[in-house]
Amino acid sequence: MSVSGGDVRIGIHASISGELTHALREAAELECQTVQLFSRNPRGWAARALGATEVRAFRRERERLGLDPLFIHAPYLLNLAAANPEVRERSIRALRQEIRRAVQLGADYLIL
């Protein structure tokens, strides 16, 4: 789609309900060119590890659907400036984990 002489990529923030590839298919069904998603529960500290098979399937599906760029949104709980040292330390650990997950999934951007 061309708007005012520039290319605009249309996307959605899609649900990963059930599996990560669900978000990709949801975006493609709506004829989006890009997608943003949470790689995990955005309201909790714990996150399950991403399996190699799951990561490969996600990357293949993204390539097949031509969704680019990919945005990963970090969990809402992150507060790197928290006065409470425990919250700040948990936030730092969660951010590091989210960076690793974004790299695994081939994300182009990580939104904090």
Image (tube, rainbow, N blue to C red):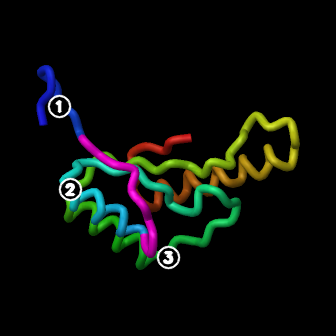
Q: Main secondary structure of the magenta part?
A: loop
Q: Residue at x 80, y 48 (%)?
A: 89
Q: Position of residue 41 (x, y in %)?
A: 58, 62
Q: Residue at x 25, y 53 (%)?
A: 67
Q: Position of residue 68 (x, y in %)?
A: 27, 48
Residue 17 inside the magenta-drawn segment: yes
What amino acid is found at the position of numbered circle 1 in the picture? Asp
Residue 59 inside the magenta-drawn segment: no
Query: Of 68 and 12, which appears nearest the observer?
Result: 12
The circle on residue 51 is 3
What amino acid is found at the position of numbered circle 3 in the picture? Gly
Q: Residue at x 72, y 38 (%)?
A: 80
Magenta-drawn segment = 10-19
In the picture as drawn, the residue positioned furthest to the bottom comes out as 53
Q: Residue at x 45, y 75 (%)?
A: 18
User: Which part of the image, by quadrant, shows the C terminus?
Assistant: top right
Number of residues whose C-alpha sits closer than 10 Å to that of mark 2, classed few (under 14), some (14–19) or many (20 or more): some
**Nearer mark to the viewer, of 2 and 3:** 2
Q: CA distance from mark 2 to mark 3?
A: 22 Å
